[in-house]
Amino acid sequence: MKLYPIETGNFKLDGGAMFGVVPKSLWQRTNPADENNMIEMAARALLIEDGDRLILIDTGMGNKQSEKFFGYYYLWGNHSLDASLAKHGFHRNDITDVFMTHLHFDHCGGSIQWNKDRTGYEPAFKNARFWTNKAHWEWATKPNRRERASFLSENILPLEESGQLQHVGLPQGNYLKESGLGFDILFVDGHTDKQMIPHITYKGKTIVFMADLLPTAGHLPIPFVMGYDTRPLITLDEKSDFLNTAADNDFYLFLEHDPNNELITVQHTEKGVRLKDSFTCEELF
């Protein structure tokens, strides 16, 4: 097995929205805001090469939305999914599986693209199966009013129409072993219903793709919960349980949205679980 970070493109989000009820005087110490109160965000996917399978976890925003839409997110930097794949010697047509942690636009938008004459949409990975789970699919295709702006029909419905959509099984509890994709999956419900957090065994280490359970290292304190989370009280419990487990077992946390910290480890302190070490993917992979 080999792992590759895939940088799909950077953007910005409102710092207050990213940290909910936490005062700016606290969160700006780790995530400084610009003059518009926006903080820098990454959209870092992960490519797993395992035998004859190439599995891409999340796909970023994509590029099919309007200029007005992208204007809300202050795109910055020169990363792109195609350039990042090419850096490692791959093309999007090589991808056999696309695993979407959840169907918010900044995690799955790159899964679908315009067709050649821009009359409709098609899968951006023509040879891949696209993986979600049935409970989250129902949640996303019948969105509540709070998440409606994050679940965009053009990112979601073409997946089913293509015939390439697959569902992983749902566990009895919240942890699925032997998912069929070569990694285990933790299911969490605080951010959105049945978000999936992959746990990958790699060279004797456990690499956890954090998605929106832990967007950045600045979100390590338990109360630092996004305003976007639909069930923040559940997030508090899920974060606490996970971070204690991560500290106990020396997990390596792959941060999808942190522009400065690609992988981190955590430790127990008097203040709770906090940052231990930070690594680049090149150092670890």
Image (tube, rainbow, N blue to C red):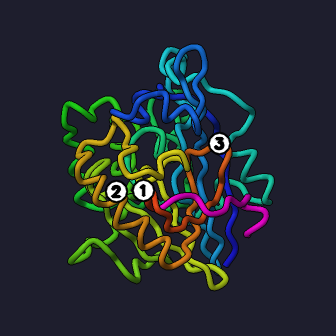
Q: Find disc 3 in the rendering and name its residue.
A: 259
Q: Are marks 2 and 1 in contact (CB under 8 Å)?
A: yes
Q: Nearer the viewer, residue 111 or 148?
A: 148
Residue at 26 percent of width and 75 percent of height:
171
The label shown at residue 195 is 2
Q: Position of residue 133 (x, y in %)?
A: 30, 62
Seen in the picture, residue 230 relative to 34 is either above or below; the reply is: below
Crowd around label 1: few <14 · some 14–19 · many ≥20 (10 Å): many
Q: Residue at x 28, y 59 (%)?
A: 237
Q: Which residues are magenta?
A: 273-285
Q: Is residue 180 above or below residue 277?
A: below
The amino acid type, in three-letter code, at marker 3 is: Pro
Residue 182 in the image: state x and y as whole percent.
Answer: 51, 79
Return the mark for residue 101: 1
Q: Is residue 224 visible?
A: yes
Asked which secondary structure carries label 1, the reply is: loop
x 67%, y 27%: residue: 76
